[in-house]
Amino acid sequence: MRIWSLCLESYSAIMSIADELKHAKTAVALTGAGISAESGLGTFRGKDGLWSRYDPAVVASIESFTRDPRTFWKFAREIGWIFLTAKPNPAHVALAELEAMKRLHCVITQNVDGLHQRAGSKRVIEIHGNAGRIICTRCSALCATEKIADRMARQDVPTCDRCGGSLKPDVVLFGEPLPKKAFEQAVKKVRSADLMLAVGTSLEVYPAASLPETAKKSGAKIISIDSERTGWDDLCDYRANGPAGEILPRIVQAIKITF
Ligand code: OAD
């Protein structure tokens, strides 16, 4: 196994990753909160992560939502505006460019911020939902989050105007299953990939965390781009430690100049 621990100056390592992407037949990206960090969205873990300030068992589990939706909505209002106002950063744009250059088949994301689509990525599989949508927990009606902004401001727990059920952002809470179709699609893409580019994820949450292993077992090479060393580095064929918003555009540039 060849592992590159690269500093940003490591031109040759960026070229090696670019070369892998250039020759891959079906590359997929798996993204996590780290890719949106440079858009001003915090990550979950680590010393400044969201879960160092909030207990996910209290604010982000389906069990606590069902028992006490008020506490959940208080938390959602506190952090929600950041999601709704964030803009894509150069890392999102680089992945969209790779797709347009036919060097990346799709993005599988654990993020709920919709920034990949806003950067121009067309094939995005959201395995943890999307905070831009609200779902009724009773009748499953969906609507855009911005459409219920006034209800969110007026009501402690916004309710469905059709059936009166409690509304919830259409994101996966701890204890909830992943959206079946999206996850099945993700597994299918991963099994047929020959390269996985994992960006900004600690891979601490299953089943998303199983995807690189699945890719590896199917014969794919694994590249990790993360600002820190992660607990799953041993699985990687290549590793680039640094901000995704700096590394990914350099990889795209390297592919362009060597075409
Ligand atoms: P984490 O917060 O667990 O991990 C974020 C990763 O991004 C870490 O490995 C950081 O080192 C890295 N990172 C931070 N800034 C970066 C940057 N600028 N460039 C590159 N990497 C950077 O977030 P996730 O792995 O996405 O689930 O967390 C997975 C799931 O746990 C989330 O989807 C969410 C959470 O609880 C649910 O809410 C269901």
Image: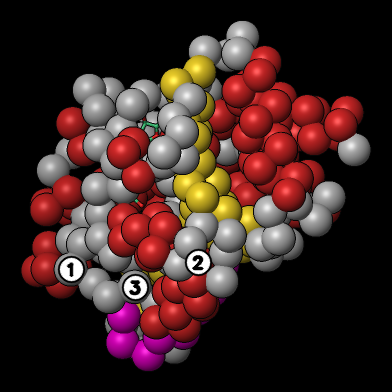
Q: Find residue 18 and report its horizontal and vertical position in percent.
A: 70, 35
Work out how far the residue at label 3 is from the one at label 1, CA to CA, in angstroms: 9 Å
Pointer 1 residue: 175
**Quadrant of the image occupied by residue 92:** top right
Residue type indicated by callout 1: Gly
Q: CA distance from mark 2 to mark 1?
A: 24 Å
Mark 3: secondary structure: loop
Q: Quadrant of the C terminus?
A: top right
Residue at 21% from the left image edge and 62% from the top image edge: 174
- Span colored in magenta: 137-149
Asked whether the residues under the numbered discs 3 and 2 touch, taking CB atoms below 8 Å apart as contact, a structural biologist would say: no
Q: Is residue 4 above or below residue 216?
A: above
Q: Position of residue 194 (x, y in %)?
A: 58, 60
Residue at image x 61%, y 9%? 9
**Residue at the front extreme of this rendering:** 1
The amino acid at mark 2 is Val
Q: Is residue 138 left or right of residue 153?
A: left
Tag 3 near tag 1, CB within 8 Å? no
> What residue is shown at x 12% (from left), y 63% (from top)?
64
Q: Which mark is residue 178?
A: 3
Q: Is residue 91 left or right of residue 5?
A: right
